Structure formats: C-alpha cells, structure tokens
Image: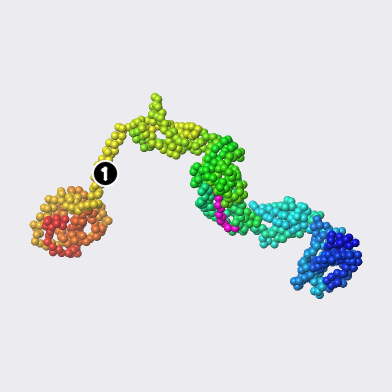
C-alpha cells in the first residue's frame, strides 16, 4: 500500500495534491492535516518532503477552490461596482484551446498593492469555481463550452473598499483572433501595401482582414474599410503621397474567430518621392606595403536629401558590376567610406522610412584601367580552347592568400567571373567557362586576391578584395579588316616627306597590333615601278619618308599587321617632292619680294621714324600762305609801301577803326566769296589793288604794331575772317589784313552816307610812325 501510494504521489504530485486537498485536507494556519489514514500511516519522510514543497507552492500562488458550498452572495455582498474600482473585465479564448479562457481586467484607482478574487459560475450556479489571491490583472480559467458563464472579479475583497466587475457570455462566442503579431507598411505611387503577420495559433484561422485609415489629424475614418486579398496582404489605392496616414487592422470574423477587435493605431509616414543627390565622390589609391603590390582604393562618398520629408536613414547597396556579390548597408549619415579593389562597381543610395523607400540615385565606380600593375608582366594567359584557358601569375601569392577571383570581359560587355581556391601553384586552369570565348575579340582579364577563406565566394564587398594585376588576350587573332585613315603629307622637301595618319579602331584590328607597313612607289600611270615598304612601330602615327627623288610624284598606302598577318590597305594617296629648279626660283622670288617691300614701304617708315625721333622746326618763310602773298604781288606791294613811305615819313597817322565782332548773316555770301577768291594769286593781287585804290580815294589804312596786337588779342573764333595756318605769325598777318580791309570799307561807307557822323566813328589816335617795308616784313 505504501508503494502504491508513493507511485501515485510521485507520478503527478501537483494533480494528486490538488485532488487530495479538495477532498481530504483542511487548512489550519499555514499547514495541512492529512486525514486519510491509508497513506499517512505508511508515508515516508521523502514523501513528506515532496508534500511540503507542494504546500509552499500553493500558499505563494493564487489558489482555486470549489465555491459551490459557500454562500458567495453573503460573503462579497459589501463589494459593488464603482467607477474608481476594478473595471473592464473581459474573457476570451482561442479556437485551438477549447474549455480554456483568459480573463483580463483593469485595476481601480485605489492602493497600489491589490489582490483579486475571481469567481466563475455556470449551469445556474451548479458549477462554481473561485480563484483567490490573484496579484496580476489576468488569469486563465477552465469552463464548460456548452453552458453560459458568469464571471466576477473582486478587488480588495477582504477590505471595506471592495469593488467588483462582472462579465457574462457564452464560451462558444468568446473565440478571439488577433491582434496582429507584426505589421509592415509600404508606400509607392499613391498606393499603400499592408503586410500582416498573426500569432501562430491565429494564422490558420484568419482568412481575411480589414484596414481602415484616415489622414493624420482627421476626425473620421475611411467610409468603408478595405478588405485584404488574403490573410497577409492588403492594398489601398489612391492615397495622397505627401500626407501622413493612421490605420487600424481587424480580422474578418468566422466560426473560429467570433471576436475580432481593432488593433492599435499605426502611423504611416508620407511617401518619399525624391532621390538623394550625390555631392562628392573621391577615389584614392591605398599604398600597399606588401611585396606583391596588391592594390585597393578608398572610396569616400557624400550625398544629401533635397526635401524635408520624414526619413529614418539611407540604404546603400554596393555590388560588383560582374554581379558576383552585393552588400546592403543602412546608415543614418549622408556619407560612407568603403575599401574596394580595382574592379568595377554599381552603387545605389535611397532614403527610407518605415513605410517608403525613395527612388535610388545610382553611381558607377569604373574599373581602374591605368593601374600600376597593368602591363607589368605579372599575368600571362594561355588559351586552350574557347571554353578553357590557364592564367599564370608572377609572384608566390600562396604565402599570403589562397582565395582568388578572375574577371574577364570584352570591351563594352559585362564581365564574367570565376572564383577559385589555390594553395599550391601560381597558376590555375579555368574550365569550363561560363560563356565560350569569341575569336578576334580582345579580352581584358584581372586577377583579384582574397585573404579570407570565407570570401572565396564573396559575401562582403567592403574591404574583402585586392587587385593583383591585369592583362589582355585573344582566343584567336586575325589580321586587321580596316586601314589607317586621314593620311596626310607635310614638310615636303626635295627628297623627303612626313606622313601622318589616324590609328585603326580596336574592334577592326582583331589582334595585337604589331606595327604599320608603308607601301610607296613612284607614280607612273603608263609604266611599272618597283614597290618599296617600310615597317613602323605601332605606337607611332607619323613617319618621315626619305631617300626620295626630287620633283617626283609618289603614291602611298598604309596597312596594319598583327600576328595573323597584314591587313587591308587604305586608298592610294599621291604626293610630289619639290624640284631643284623650283626651289632656286622660289628663293629668288622670296628675295625679290623682300626688296620690293622695302622699296615701297621703307621710305614712309623711315620718314615716320624721323618725325617721331627728330622733329624739325618749321620755317615761316617757306609757308604756302606767304608764297601766295609775296609771289605774284611782291612788286605791287613794295611799290605801294614805298609810296606811303615817301609821303608820310614824318607824319603821324590818324586811324579810324570800326570793329565788328560778328559778321552779319547778310554778309556771309560775301565772306565765302572772299575765301574762294583768296586762294588764287590773281585774287591776292586784286585785293592789293583794291587797297591801293581805296587809299588813293580816301583814308589810307595804316598797320601799326598796336593794330596787330589788338588783332592778336581778338578771339580768333569770333573774328569774321580768321584763317588757320600752321604758323602763328601767318595767322596774325592773315587776321590783320581782313580786319584793316573791313575797317576801311566801313569808314568809306560811313563817310559817303553820313558825313555829319564822322566823329562818332573815331576810334583812337595812333602816335606811332608809319611802318616801312622792313618793319612789316619783320612782323611777318
């Protein structure tokens, strides 16, 4: 019996003690007195130890007892429903757990230390279950699914401030699904995509769900919730990309989900519609101290986001252009630093928030073509077939790395790649190739090294690869299918000419260009001549062709050649060397032209230089004005002066001068006539004759030094007969003569018309003697 009792206890002590305590135990203080004589008399000390542990567990936890025999109404009749007390009692269950429910409630506003008692009644109170000393705000309960239930929770049931909350319902209608376990949103082009993950027990029960939404700050939800396509994805159309929205999610009710409550409110940020803008990109070579000179580049990239939209950070995707590997990174700063090999890369940058990803800005990182290891003989390739080749490297790289990657490509095409592991040799045969090699196509091949074995198949792009070297190869070489173009000749001499041409395009060479061949022969349409040729280095695009005959026409053709042979020739070009006679004649013509230029332009140039460097002083006696005066009328003037000298040598002269500052408009024709008349010698003589006649008929005009001074002080611009000359003395003389003439004319007219007004025309008396001819010429 002892063994039987012990097996019963040890097999399931908790269940055994629960049934035992409900039927045969009474609580006294903090211990139990067992009344069953069958097991108590035969229990050993070990059994009592197990039972003591079970007692401690039940004392410290909420206890659930049958309350059928207790008068619940009288025991908790002092507890009532109060606004500040316990409230919002709710019970629900899951479809996969029949008979089990969970009840939740909210505490009152009383003391912080609260205990609760929960009582369940079913089948018209025939079934009653009470759970005491609950310290949380929820508990699990067991029910009969076929009977309605009534649940009451009491807060601080032992005190006078006891409050309660009541829940009634049918267990079959308490199957609740939700809320969602995880929700993600995606916005693009005015569309919202909702992706929902449910709790594991709800995944099979939920077939559809609803989404209701509204703009942030709006008071009303959308008119009708949007139903999902399935239990995971729901799409909402025609949203404003610039607005922030809020949304809630609710599962669609069915027999397994009789209750579906709305989820919490989710905030969906506005859609990101603009792409970042790259500010700067710097690529710097990293100096390597390794003896094998494996190369890397330091990439520093900065950008900015031009709008003020809400964004959480940036997604940066960096991948090899060959497609071998991509790496995704997230950063909150608009900058990134990467260490890359000399391979080509694609880089994309997008701004992101929890609902949207902006359009990406792309940046190409080109392959480094002019790398220091290029053409250094570090790599060699031997092609076996169109699907197999062997690559050799110069240095013993296996001391440093065992993982490699080969990239090869045609010009303008995407690179193919083949990673491999090598720890014994400095060469590797790659076969079969991803794509067969094409004949007559040039391939660029690059060898990269990877020190980490984990990156033989590249997993990380940043700082995981170095470039060892690069070279070029052909599967099959051919001869060039085109010739050099734009052939021209210059610096033609008696026996030489310089030829110049443009290179053959790379795609037309079809092999490695070994040089150019220049074919030339004397141009003789009616006869035959021996063709000669010269080989030129492939790096040159010009060549001086010598040892030619003077005055001879030549025809020239040029072609390129590879290992497969010479290519096609270009169209014939004809040029002619200079002849010896023509060369001498050109020298004579040149000398004659120089002498003619000196004779034509030399004298004016010398004179001009003499005027600038050694200016001459003018001679008044050689002026044109003086020659006009003294030339044809010199005798008449001297005779008139001698007559005046004989008659008035010892007398004083009375001068009557009337000055007119401005020539009246009516006299302008006379003035112009006088100017025209003055240019000829005859007019000068006539003028002197008129003076003589006027002098014989009346008052003689006498010129004194003071008269000349007065004339000189008169403004030349206002003088009616001011003549410009290159000599100052002649200007004074020419200004004085017309003035005296004008005065004489005025006096004569005044005397004839109004004799009685003679006194009013008196100017001034001159006490100077009449000047003789010597003094006049001195003034002149």
Taking the spot 38% from the left edge, 29% from the top edge, the residue there is 522
- Can residue 532 be seen at all in this image of the molecule? yes
Left or right? Give the position of 507 relative to 133: left
- Residue placed at 54% from the left, 47% from the top? 467
Toward the bottom, the furthest residue is 160
| 611 or 428, nearer to the observer | 428
Q: Where is residue 589 in the image (x, y as percent from the top left)?
A: 28, 36
User: Would you call the spot at circle 1 few (<14 residues within 10 Å), some (14-19), or many (20 or more)?
Assistant: few
| Horizontal side of residue 161 vs 646, given as left or right | right
Would you place residue 132 above or below residue 200 in this image?
Answer: below
Locate the N terminus and report the quarter of the image it occupies: bottom right
What segment is highlighted magenta in the picture?
332-345
Which residue, given by chain and number where applicable, does mark 1 sit on? 601
Q: In the rendered image of this protein, does residue 718 appear above or below residue 153?
A: above
Residue, far top: 527
Residue 187 is a magenta residue: no
Which picture quadrant has residue 389?
top right
The picture places residue 469, in percent across and down from the top left corner, at: 52, 45
Q: Position of residue 157 (x, y in %)?
A: 81, 71
Q: Quadrant of the C terminus?
A: bottom left
């Amino acid at each position: 019996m002892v063994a039987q009792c012990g097996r019963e206890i040890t097999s399931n002590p908790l269940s055994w003690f629960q049934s035992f305590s409900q039927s045969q135990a009474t609580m006294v203080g903090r211990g139990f007195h067992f009344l069953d004589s069958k097991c108590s008399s035969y229990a050993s000390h070990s059994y009592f130890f197990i039972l003591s542990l079970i007692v401690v567990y039940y004392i410290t936890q909420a206890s659930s007892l049958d309350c059928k025999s207790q008068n619940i109404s009288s025991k908790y009749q002092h507890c009532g429903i109060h606004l500040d007390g316990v409230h919002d009692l709710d019970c629900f269950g899951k479809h996969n757990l029949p008979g089990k429910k969970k009840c939740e409630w909210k505490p009152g506003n009383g003391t912080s230390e609260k205990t609760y008692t929960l009582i369940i009644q079913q089948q018209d109170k025939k079934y009653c279950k009470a759970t005491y000393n609950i310290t949380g705000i929820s508990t699990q309960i067991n029910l009969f699914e076929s009977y309605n239930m009534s649940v009451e929770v009491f807060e601080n049931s032992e005190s006078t401030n006891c409050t309660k909350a009541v829940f009634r319902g049918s267990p079959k209608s308490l199957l609740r699904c939700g809320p969602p376990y995880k929700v993600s949103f995606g916005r693009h082009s005015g569309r919202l995509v909702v992706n929902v993950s449910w709790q594991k027990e709800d995944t099979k029960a939920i077939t559809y769900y609803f989404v209701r939404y509204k703009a942030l700050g709006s008071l009303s939800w959308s008119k009708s919730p949007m139903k999902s396509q399935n239990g995971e994805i729901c799409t909402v159309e025609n949203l404003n990309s610039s607005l922030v929205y809020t949304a809630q999610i609710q599962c669609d009710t069915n027999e397994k989900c009789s209750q579906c409550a709305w989820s919490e409110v989710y905030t969906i940020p506005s859609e990101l519609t603009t792409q970042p803008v790259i500010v700067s990109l710097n690529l710097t070579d990293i100096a390597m101290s390794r003896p094998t000179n494996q190369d890397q580049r330091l990439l520093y990239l900065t950008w900015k986001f031009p709008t003020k939209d809400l964004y959480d950070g940036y997604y940066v995707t960096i991948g090899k252009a060959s497609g071998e590997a991509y790496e995704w990174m997230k950063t909150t700063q608009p900058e990134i630093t990467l260490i890359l090999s000399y391979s080509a890369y694609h880089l994309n940058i997008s701004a992101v928030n929890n609902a949207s990803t902006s359009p990406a800005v792309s940046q190409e990182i080109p392959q480094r073509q002019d790398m220091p290891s290029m053409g250094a003989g570090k790599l060699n390739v031997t092609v076996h077939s169109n699907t197999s080749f062997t690559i050799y490297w110069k240095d013993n790289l296996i001391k440093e790395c065992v993982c490699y990657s080969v990239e090869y490509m045609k010009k303008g095409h995407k690179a193919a790649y083949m990673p491999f592991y090598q720890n014994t040799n400095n060469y590797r045969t790659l076969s079969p190739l991803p794509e067969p090699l094409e004949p007559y196509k040039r391939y660029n091949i690059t060898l990269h090294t990877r020190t980490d074995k984990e990156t033989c198949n590249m997993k990380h792009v940043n700082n995981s690869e170095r470039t060892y070297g690069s070279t070029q190869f052909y599967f099959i070489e051919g001869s060039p299918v085109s010739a050099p173009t734009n052939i021209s000749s210059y610096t033609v001499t008696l026996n030489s000419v310089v030829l110049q041409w443009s290179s053959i395009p790379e795609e037309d060479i079809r092999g490695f260009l070994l040089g150019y061949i220049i074919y030339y022969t004397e141009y003789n349409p009616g006869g035959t001549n021996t063709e000669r040729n010269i080989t030129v280095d492939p790096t040159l695009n010009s060549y001086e062709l010598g040892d030619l005959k003077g005055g001879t026409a030549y025809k020239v053709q040029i072609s390129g050649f590879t290992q497969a042979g010479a290519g096609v020739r270009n169209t014939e070009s004809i040029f002619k060397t200079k002849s010896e006679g023509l060369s001498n004649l050109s020298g004579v013509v040149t000398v004659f032209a120089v002498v003619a230029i000196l004779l034509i332009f030399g004298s004016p140039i010398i004179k001009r230089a003499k005027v600038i460097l050694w200016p001459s002083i003018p001679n008044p006696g050689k002026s044109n004005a003086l020659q006009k005066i003294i030339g044809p009328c010199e005798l008449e003037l001297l005779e008139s002066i001698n007559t005046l000298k004989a008659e008035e040598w010892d007398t004083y002269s009375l001068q009557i001068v009337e000055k007119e500052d401005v020539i009246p408009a009516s006299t302008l024709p006379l003035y112009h006539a006088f100017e025209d008349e003055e240019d000829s010698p005859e007019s000068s003589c006539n003028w002197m004759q008129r003076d003589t006649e006027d002098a014989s008929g009346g008052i003689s005009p006498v010129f004194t030094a003071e008269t000349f001074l007065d004339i000189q002080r008169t403004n030349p611009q206002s003088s009616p007969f001011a003549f410009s000359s290159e000599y100052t003395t002649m200007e004074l003389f020419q200004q004085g003569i017309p003035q005296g003439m004008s005065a004489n004319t005025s006096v004569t007219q005044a005397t004839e018309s109004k004799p009685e007004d003679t006194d009013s025309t008196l100017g001034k008396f001159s006490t100077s003697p009449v000047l003789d001819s010597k003094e006049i010429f001195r003034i002149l």
